[in-house]
Amino acid sequence: MKRYFALAVLLTAWAFFLPAQDKKPSEDSAFRVSSMFSDHMVIQRDTLAPVWGLAAPGTKVTVSPSWGKKKYSCTADGSGRWKVFVETPEAGGPYSLTVASKGDKVVFQDVMSGEVWFCSGQSNMALQVKGSSSQPVVGGVEAILEAPEYADRIRLYNIGNEREFEPVENIDCRWTLSDSRAAADFSAVGYFFAKYLTKALGVPVGMICGAWGGCNLETWMPMEYIDKAVKGKIPEDKYRAIVDRKEDYKLPPLQVGTMYNARLFPVKGYAVKGFLWYQGTSNMYEYAAYDKLQTELAQCWRDSWDDKDNKLPFYFCSLAPFAYQDPANQARGYFVEAQLRTLDMIPNSGAAITETLGDSCCIHPAKKPQVARQLALLALERDYDVDNGLGSSFPYPARVTFPAGSSVVEKEIRQSGFPVKICKSDKQEGKIVINLANASSGVGAYSNQLEETYIEVRGFEVASPDRVFRPVKANAGHSVITLDCSGIDDPVAVRYGFRCYIDADVVTCYGTPLPPFRTDDWPQNQ
C-alpha cells in the first residue's frame, strides 16, 4: 500500500490512468491501459476477455499474455481508443500480461484466471466485513483474521469514486490481495460470496464492488433507460420526481446516472461472470415503479457488457424487514412483491430472500453470510452446474386452499414472480392450508419417522371481505402450513410477512426463508 501511495503522490497529473507496471510510459505519451487492469487482478477464465485503453490515433498496440504464445494486436482509432479480445486460460496462475505500444510497455504481474463478479447496491451491499458503528457482521472478525489464507484465491476491486455527471473512463482504483485490511474494508455480502465460491469451485474469485449507501436505483443507469422503464407508464408527477432530482452532496446519490457514470462506466465490459444487486431502501415507497426500473437496470448493465443474449445472470436480494417509521406499514411488503415480480421480467435472474434475516432496530442486518450463501447457491447451481442437493430457489406457496364456505374466487395468481393457485375445499372447515413448493427438505420438524410433530410458525394474517387483516395461529409440518381461521367470518385473503417489520419465521431446513406474499389483489392503499 505504501508503494501505491508513493506512486500516486509522484504521478498526480495522470494517476487516474496508470496501471501498476514495471516501466511507465513517457510523460508525453498518449499510451494508457484502462484502470481496470493492475497487478493481482483476476481475469474471467475460459472466455474472450477485452483489454482496452488509450494510445495515439493509428498506433499499434500488442497484448501478450504469459499463458500462451499467441499475441493480440489492434490499432488505436481516431479518438485514440483501442481494444483487443484475449483468449483466457482455465483457472490458475499466477500469470503476467504485457501491453506494449511503440516504446511504451506495461507488465501486469500476479494475474490469476478464475471467476469475476460485479456487485453493487446501497448500504446493505456496501456494509463492510468489519461492520459499522453498532452494526456488526456475523462472522466478520473470523473472516478478517482468515483473509490472508485466501490471498491467492480472492482478489478485490473496491471502487471508491465519487458521483459523476458525465461518464469517466478511468478511476483511481487497483486490484488488491485478500489481506486482512482489504477484506475488512470490502462488502461483506461480496466477500462472503467470493469465499463460498472459491471453496466450492476451487478457483480464484475476483470481486468488483461499487456500492454506495443510500443511493437510489435510478443513479445506476442513464436517462434513456429511465425513460424506457417508466416514461408514460407512471403518472407524470412521479416521473418528474425521478428525472428532476439534483445531487445534494450532503445526501447519498440521487440524480439519474451519477453512479453509472462514476462506478459502472469505468469498469463496464471487463469480463465478468455475472451481477449481484442489493438495493431498495431508498426506493421503498416507489414500489409501483420499481419492477420496471430494476428490469431496465439489468438490461442497461447487460447492454454495457454487450450481452445480447442475456447470458450474464442478474441476482438480487429482497429488502429485509425493518421497523422504519411504522413497523405495521405494508410498504415493504408491496416493495418486495415488486422486486420478486422482476423474476418474470428479467431473463436469467434469481433472488436471495432476507425475510427472516432482518432486525426491527437495525436497517443493516448482521447476517450477511446467510445472504451471500443464497447468492452463492444460485450461482453454483445455475452457472456452474454444481448439484449439491441443496437447491437454489426459495420456497413459495404453490397452493392456498380456503374452506368451502369462503367467498374467495378460485384462480391462479402470479403477483410475485411465482404462481399461486387459490382453491377451496370442504375437508378443512376453519382452516386454510398452504402447500409450499421448493421445500422438499421441509419447514417444521418431525419427532420421528412415524408421527408428525407440527411446530408453530409466525407472520401470517387473514382477512375477510372487510379487508382488515388479523394475525392467526399457524402450524408447519414438512411442506404444509395450516392456518387457524376459525375466528374469522368468510376468510378470503392471506398475507405473510407483508409489513415493514413482522415476526415472520418460516424457513426451510436448509435455512432459506419464505418470502412475503399475499393472495389478494386489493388496491395498495389498503
Image: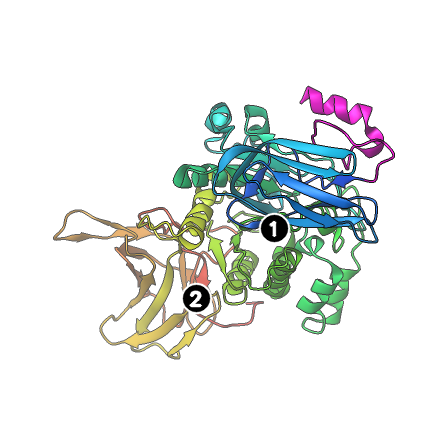
Q: Main secondary structure of the magenta part?
A: loop
Is 384 left or right of 64, judged from the image as shown? Answer: left
Q: Judge from the rendering whether residue 24 lies leftward or rightward of residue 379; answer left or right.
A: right
Say if residue 265 shows up in the picture: no
Residue beneath disc 2: 418
Residue at 42% over, 50% down: 384
- In front: label 2 or label 1: 2
* Disc 1 residue type (three-letter): Thr
Chain part drawn in magenta: 1-30
Instruction: Determine the secondary structure under disc 1.
Output: helix
In the rendered image, which residue does mark 1 sit on? 281
Q: Quadrant of residue 470?
A: bottom left
Q: CA distance from mark 2 to mark 1?
A: 23 Å
Dot 2 alpha-carbon crowd within 10 angstroms: few under 14, some 14 to 19, many 20 or more: some
Which residue ends up furthest to the front in the rendered image? 69
Which residue occupies the foreground of this view, 398 or 162?
162
